[in-house]
């Protein structure tokens, strides 16, 4: 199975792209951070990202989703963010990587879980805030740069998916994975 990472800054349009890929018949593995935020906010934690344990909760959910998805009998799978994104998030938030985060980064490297080509969705020039996405456009650009550095540091090649319609971006993704 070829597992491709789809990543980018918050609000770049990843979810819309993934929904189209899913409608087109591809297997999609959902990102974990938004679900962890929603759950912890429902439990009364207003800003879960201010707690270092937040990152381990993301890593644990990412791992469970990746292992469950590995059982699917498909040739191509798209993962909405991965542990490498969580490492970028740790850097952005100013938290040192936890033991769990380091172990999971090492596991995906050794097991070569993901394709080395990462589909990096470029920002749209704005960010629409949500309960889980409380980041300004300026902050998103800083986060985007950290993401790029983190993926390069981990040995991945970034394939940039430039702004456009969802259909145009999906077409660019399909061209990239076929080359």
Image: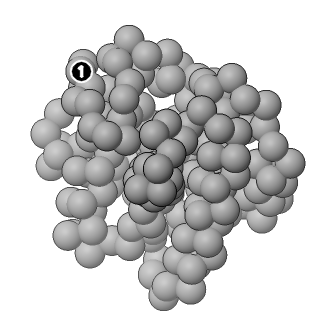
Could you tell me if residue 116 is visible in this image? no
Question: 173 and 49: which one is in front?
Answer: 49
Residue 46 image point, x, y percent: 45, 40
**Image height of 142 relative to 61, above or below:** above
Residue 170 image point, x, y percent: 25, 50
Could you tell me if residue 47 is visible in this image? yes
**Image height of 30 relative to 154, above or below:** below
Q: Which residue is rendered at x = 48% and y = 24% of the image?
A: 144
Q: Which residue is rendered at x = 52% and y = 77% of the image?
A: 69
Residue at mark 1: 126
Q: Badge 1: how crowded within 10 Å, few (<14), some, or many (20+)?
A: some
Instruction: Answer with left or right where residue 138 lies relative to residue 20.
Output: right
Question: 136 and 105: which one is in front?
Answer: 136
**Image height of 102 relative to 136, above or below:** below
Regarding mark 1 in the picture, which secondary structure is present there? loop
Instruction: Answer with left or right where residue 28 lies relative to residue 126.
Output: right
Question: 22 and 174: which one is in front?
Answer: 22
Residue 47 image point, x, y percent: 49, 36
Instruction: Answer with left or right where residue 88 lies relative to residue 141.
Output: right
Residue extending furthest toward the front:
44
Residue extending furthest toward the top:
138
Instruction: Answer with left or right where residue 152 lies relative to residue 123.
Output: right
**Image height of 38 relative to 95, above or below:** below
Q: Which residue is rendered at x = 20% and y = 70% of the image?
A: 23
Identify the image quadrant of the N terminus.
bottom right
Residue 159 image point, x, y percent: 46, 37
């Amino acid at each position: 199975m070829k597992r491709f990472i789809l990543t980018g800054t918050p609000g770049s349009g990843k979810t819309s792209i993934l929904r189209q890929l899913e409608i087109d018949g591809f297997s999609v593995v959902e990102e974990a951070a938004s679900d962890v935020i929603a759950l912890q906010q429902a439990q009364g934690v207003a800003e879960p990202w201010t707690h270092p344990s937040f990152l381990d909760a993301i890593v644990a959910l990412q791992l469970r989703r990746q292992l469950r998805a590995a059982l699917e009998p498909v040739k191509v799978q798209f993962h909405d963010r991965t542990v490498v994104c969580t490492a970028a998030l740790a850097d952005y938030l100013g938290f040192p990587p936890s033991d769990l985060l380091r172990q999971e980064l090492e596991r995906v490297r050794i097991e070569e879980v993901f394709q080395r080509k990462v589909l990096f969705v470029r920002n749209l020039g704005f960010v629409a805030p949500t309960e889980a996405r409380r980041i300004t456009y300026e902050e998103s650009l800083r986060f985007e740069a950290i993401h790029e550095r983190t993926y390069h540091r981990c040995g991945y090649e970034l394939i940039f998916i430039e702004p456009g319609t969802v259909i145009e971006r999906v077409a660019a993704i399909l061209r990239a994975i076929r080359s």
